[in-house]
Amino acid sequence: MKRILDLIGWLGTALVFIGAAIRLGFPAREQYVPYLIVAGLVCVAAYAAGHWREIAGVFGRRQTRYGALAGVSFLAFAGVVILVNYIGAVQKKRWDLTTNQSYSLSDQTKNVIGKLDAPLDIKVFAQEPDFPTFQDRLKEYEYGSKRITTEYVDPDKKPADARQNNITQYGTIVFSYKGRTERTTSNTEQDITNGIIKVVSGQTKKVYFTQGHGEHDTMSSDPNGYSTIATALGRENYTIDKVVIAQAGSVPADASVVVVAGPKIDFLAPEVDALKKYLSNSGKLLLEIDPPDKPDSPPLKSLIALAHDWGMDVGDNLVLDASGMGRLIGAGPEVPLAASYPPHPITERFNFLTAFPLARSVDPVMGGVNGHTAQPIVQTSPQSVAAADVAGLLSGRVKQVPQPDDKNKKGPITIAAAVSAASTPAPAAPPTPGEPEAPKPETRVVVYGDSDFAANNVIGTQGNRDLFMNTVGWLSQQENLIAIRPKEPDDRRLTLTATQQSNLMWISLIIIPACIFGTGFYTWWRRR
């Protein structure tokens, strides 16, 4: 009887191992695994029931108790490890410990992918050894939205798939959304997110910059040009164009936003009338009205009056900052820095410094004008002053920041404001089935008391670029674009001189090993 029970015990153990082997090595046969394991466990249980006295005697020994305690401790430790890994696999919580958050998605990307209402397919066409380069980046997008799926295709192994997608270059990323496709050949977060924006929006917004009055040129790469911001707009699916309203006679019908970027001379009456007509039909206008740059510069009365019609008073002053914050960027008091942003969609969660060279105040009119009540969006520090003697400051007669008084307003000074108003244009065509409902028609106007904050030589200041892009995003009613955009990773390379490299070599190869050897020799000598 004992011999039969021994055979049953060995048979049960063998059945359990065979079931495990089939489960791991032959998935096609895994339907037999439960039966094998159950049969094996029954055999082992029968063996244990027939030898219960011997088993009880073994567990009565001291060494067995110690072994059992060690076994239980090991099982508890293994259980904790398995539990932690299971929670990690389910929750997918990650921490980015890099200084510049290089492995975290920006607020803009989170906004864009968080509002997807249909599956977004991403195909990466690259050589197989290069897959990990793209996976490191795109995994963050998959974690950020369950609607995103990624596929990696080697064009050399699947040429038919590559031809179908018109792939002519390794490293091409193709985005597919609601039957639309977009592509990019860059692996940076900014370019990937911009590709998603383009395929999701399905249409291009057109931004017109007025010309003919000394405005900033979107084609100029000079320090005073707007080429950098024009490129940034193009990357977010905006089309940039210029318009001379005096020649065109009206604002183009396809204008999503009109930008008046720092004119030196005033608009003519027919041009202002064209802007008013455009605004009456759900138009979007960004006015950037600088203070005079010379003591005898002509005032921009028509544009200032247009801003007042929409509830904003453009001051005849020059904002100066006596707080010394300008030294952070190597500037003086004539370049006030702003770090205060009253609540508004343009500046939601916006907490960066912005710089405004030669700015004037833009105050919302108390009680509004014509039913238009503006909101402040940018304010300077409490140590700033809106100096009234602009001519004296520009000519050099005033040498320092004046003290606040009846004429010189004490900070904080509002230098940008925004207003919106519902409008009722002609009924539009019904939306395409499956497309999201178009935003309600609104007229939106934003006025800045400075235009140089978006120029090439200043746009790199902390939050200037994001502030301008958020403003255009709000004006074009694309609130998903209002966020902090991806930043370029910091360059943290350590550059050493030849002497420093030589010293480092001697320290690592000679001095440190010699110290370790000397310590060991001294210890040996003492013991001897």
Image: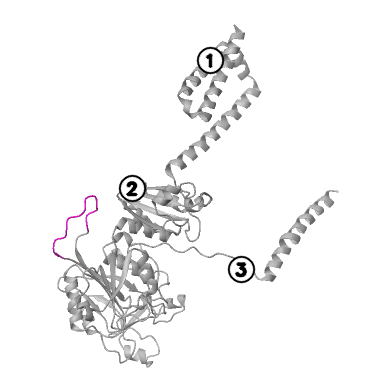
Q: Can residue 107 be seen in this view?
A: no
Residue located beneath label 2 in the image: 119
Start-end of magenta stretch:
423-438
Separation of marks 1 and 2 at Cα, in angstroms: 51 Å
Residue located beneath label 1 in the image: 43
Q: What residue do we see at 80% from left, 51% from top?
A: 523
Kindly identify the amino acid type of the residue bearing the numbered disc 3.
Thr
Magenta-colored stretch includes residue 285: no
Kindly identify the amino acid type of the residue bearing the numbered disc 2.
Pro
How many other residues sit within 10 Å of disc 2, few (<14), some (14-19) or many (≥20)? some
Q: Place residue 215 in its image quadrant.
A: bottom left
Q: What residue do we see at 27% from left, 89% from top?
A: 298
Q: Is residue 263 above or below residue 284?
A: below
The picture places residue 484, in percent across and down from the top left corner, at 38, 62
For the residue pair 248 and 491, the one nearer the viewer reads as 248
Q: Place residue 333 in its image quadrant.
A: bottom left
N-term-proximal mark, 3 vs 1: 1
> Dot 1: what SS?
helix
Magenta-colored stretch includes residue 436: yes
The picture places residue 443, in percent across and down from the top left corner, at 20, 68
Residue located beneath label 3 in the image: 495
N-term-proximal mark, 1 vs 2: 1
Separation of marks 3 and 1 at Cα, in angstroms: 70 Å
How many other residues sit within 10 Å of disc 1, few (<14), some (14-19) or many (≥20)? many
